[in-house]
Image (cartoon, grey):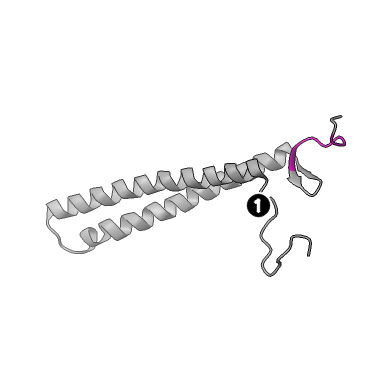
């Protein structure tokens, strides 16, 4: 038993703790969110940049440049999105911020 009343796990505010399993679940969900949102962002960017080259009859050189640029930009933004989401999540966990789900219409978590 520890000095905080026997609770083991991460402190999440208002006297509550988060179990190690809940923390693992939260990390798994956040990784999934980071990957899914990054894939969608990369696909959108690739489509915007390379789409005209694939739809319109452009020269081979222009098509190759646009496809390469779209793939490169998509890959860079994919990595940036994954890293930014996971860094934000880590900071929120470390600071104890955003441990309660969003509640539209409420201005106070106790309301």
Q: How many marks?
A: 1
Using a 10 Å C-alpha cutoff, classify the residue at mark 1 as few (fewer than 14 neighbours), some (14 to 19) or many (20 or more): few
Q: Is residue 13 above or below residue 55?
A: above
Quarter that holds the N terminus: top right
- Residue 11 placement: quadrant: top right
Please give the name of the residue rendered at 87% of the width and 36% of the height, measured from the top-left corner. 5
What is the magenta range?
A: 4-11
Relative to residue 20, is residue 33 drawn left or right?
left
Q: What residue occupies the far top of the structure in this picture?
A: 1
Please give the name of the residue rendered at 15% of the width and 62% of the height, measured from the top-left corner. 57
Q: Is residue 4 above or below residue 54?
A: above
Q: Position of residue 31 (x, y in %)?
A: 55, 44
- Residue 111 placement: quadrant: bottom right
Q: Is residue 83 above or below residue 54?
A: above
* Residue matched to label 1: 98
What main secondary structure does the magenta stretch of the protein show?
loop
Please give the name of the residue rendered at 53% of the width and 43% of the height, measured from the top-left corner. 86
Q: Secondary structure at mark 1?
A: loop
In the image, 5 versus 22, the foreground residue is 5
Relative to residue 26, is residue 3 drawn left or right?
right
In the image, 94 versus 70, the foreground residue is 94
Please give the name of the residue rendered at 19% of the width and 50% of the height, measured from the top-left corner. 65
């Amino acid at each position: 038993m520890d000095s905080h009343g026997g609770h083991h796990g991460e402190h999440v505010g208002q006297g509550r703790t988060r179990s190690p399993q809940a923390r693992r679940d939260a990390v798994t969900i956040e990784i999934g969110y980071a990957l899914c949102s990054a894939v969608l962002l990369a696909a959108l960017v690739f489509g915007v940049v390379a789409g005209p080259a694939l739809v319109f009859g452009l020269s081979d050189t222009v098509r190759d440049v646009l496809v390469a640029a779209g793939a490169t930009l998509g890959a860079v933004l994919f990595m940036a999105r994954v890293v930014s989401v996971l860094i934000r999540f880590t900071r929120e966990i470390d600071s104890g911020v955003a441990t309660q789900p969003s509640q539209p219409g409420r201005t106070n978590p106790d309301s």
